[in-house]
Amino acid sequence: MARLWTWLREDVWEIRFRRYVALTLAAVLAGLGVWGGMTATKENRSCAPGVVQPKGSDECVGVSWTTYAFGRAQFADTVRAIHRENARLAPGSYVTVALLEPFTATDADNLGDVLHELQGAYLAQYQANHDTTDLKPKIRLVLANPGSTGTYWQHTVDQLAGMTGGSDRLRAVTGVGLSTDNNKKAVQELTSRGIPVIGSSITADDLANGQNGKDPFPGLARVSPTNTDEARALASFAKVSAANAFLVYDRTGDPYTRTLQASFEKMLKGSRYEAQPFTPPADRSKEGSTSNVFMQITNILCNTPTTTNTILFAGRHTQLRQFINMLGQRGCHDRRFTVLTGDEGSYLAGDKDLDPAALKDPLLTVRYTSLAHPDAWLQDAAKTGGSAADAKVLQSLLGGAGKEPVGPLGPIALDDGQLIIAYDAMRLAVRGIRGASPTGKIPALADVGLQWPQVKGKEQRVNGASGWICLNVHGNPYDKAVPIVQLTPESRARFVKIAWPEGKPPSAECLPPA
């Protein structure tokens, strides 16, 4: 009996017990493994508070309010300055403004654009919070990234919409950046949810209200002229003759290139030659094989009479640079040509891929409309529409940007106009927020976007560093100053003259006509 009990205990019970324990432990470990794997996966997709990495993407998108710089070292100084400024704000004293930009852009030109807009928005935030009159509410700035090409705009817009309540009190979104289809969708969704948007460098006509009398983006205001207004200003300055001009355009187009093309076509009614198209890659920051097409277009230009000397270019900056390089190698090297284009030309200054021979060609001139230029109001004698005194306010602020309490912000560049125009866009956002609550209390979200039609006249306009911002009832700037800039042989942006969509500066009252 003793042996039987020993056998049952050692060979049956204890073996089964150990087996049960082993199975139980295995199940627990398996469960922990699954949970741990899920947790690790979740942590791997979180880049920073408010910022995640979508499945199948290597980008980090969303809204950041920390020192996270989206993996771009050039943003780090300015992001730290913004975080320091935000940390100074007392709870309940501020509203939030989001800067919507492609912070994970990979193209060097786009990254430079984003950096300058980031710096400009911050400088306006700092100025608003440190105004000697201690106006309220104070401004908190956060960074909203929809992805390098705006692919994840829906995710970021949803996140912004969730920030309109609670302690965030989001009251406006500024920036937006390029006039692309994805950015157009983002603006449409934001404004449909009642969130005011202040576009800094968007110029496409179909990303504006007032076209055909309709307002598809309720609550949208802009500080940059539309492509149509830029083209009108350019035509007024250059005295473009349809008989002597030639159009080159992006066949597939995006909101910027399509509306610029349409504006140029209006200028060229009666032209003796059909326009020449090119087809760039879907990502217009890529090279593709477009240079081959441009080489053929330059051959066509060489076959035109010598009186055809003006080329209107409706395309993005990468293709513009390729086209200029091909013109520099044209067979008819004794022919004079002037290339006129929109504000994408601002990316050319300092572009290392521009052919030096093309830049130094005395018979090839490249001019473009800029959103702003640091020399415009210091060199032009215009008496209205802006002033040197207004421009010097920003210059004074920049004087302290190299160290605390304002900076440091890293290298500052003004020639492309992006810092200046982003600064003015944030100032307009602050005007709308504080105009919606003269008592300094937190304004209702719905009231901020209602302020735009009243931003006009001597007392209500924004005296921007880029020029006066006098909005019409659709939120578009009326007769906004348009600096004409020329690319120099040293690859610099040289200011030429201020041009005006109306052919002359606005009156001192700056009131849009009926």
Image (spheres, rainbow, N blue to C red):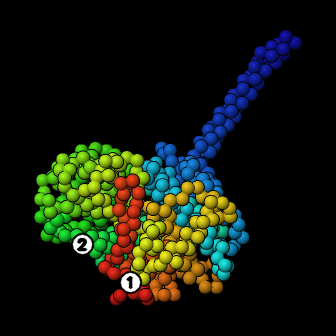
Residue lying at 78% horizontally and 21% vertically, measured from the top left = 13
In the figure, residue 383 lies in which quadrant? bottom left
Q: Nearer the viewer, mark 2 or mark 1?
A: 2
Residue 430 vs residue 91, the one in the foreground = 430
Q: Quadrant of the N terminus?
A: top right
Residue lying at 22% horizontally and 55% vertically, measured from the top left = 277
**Mark 1 residue element:** loop
Q: Is residue 316 visible?
A: yes
Residue where numbered disc 2 is placed: 239
Q: Quadrant of the C terminus?
A: bottom left
In the figure, residue 118 lies in which quadrant? bottom right
Q: Position of residue 493 (x, y in %)?
A: 40, 60
Looking at the image, residue 60 lies above or below residue 341: above
On residue 506, the disc is 1
Q: Is residue 81 visible?
A: no
Looking at the image, residue 63 lies above or below residue 266: above
What's under tag 1, amino acid-wise? Pro
Question: What is the crowding at mark 1: few (fewer than 14 residues within 10 Å), some, or many (at least 20)?
Answer: many
Q: Going by the image, does 429 lie left or right of 258?
A: right
Residue lying at 87% horizontally and 12% vertically, measured from the top left = 2
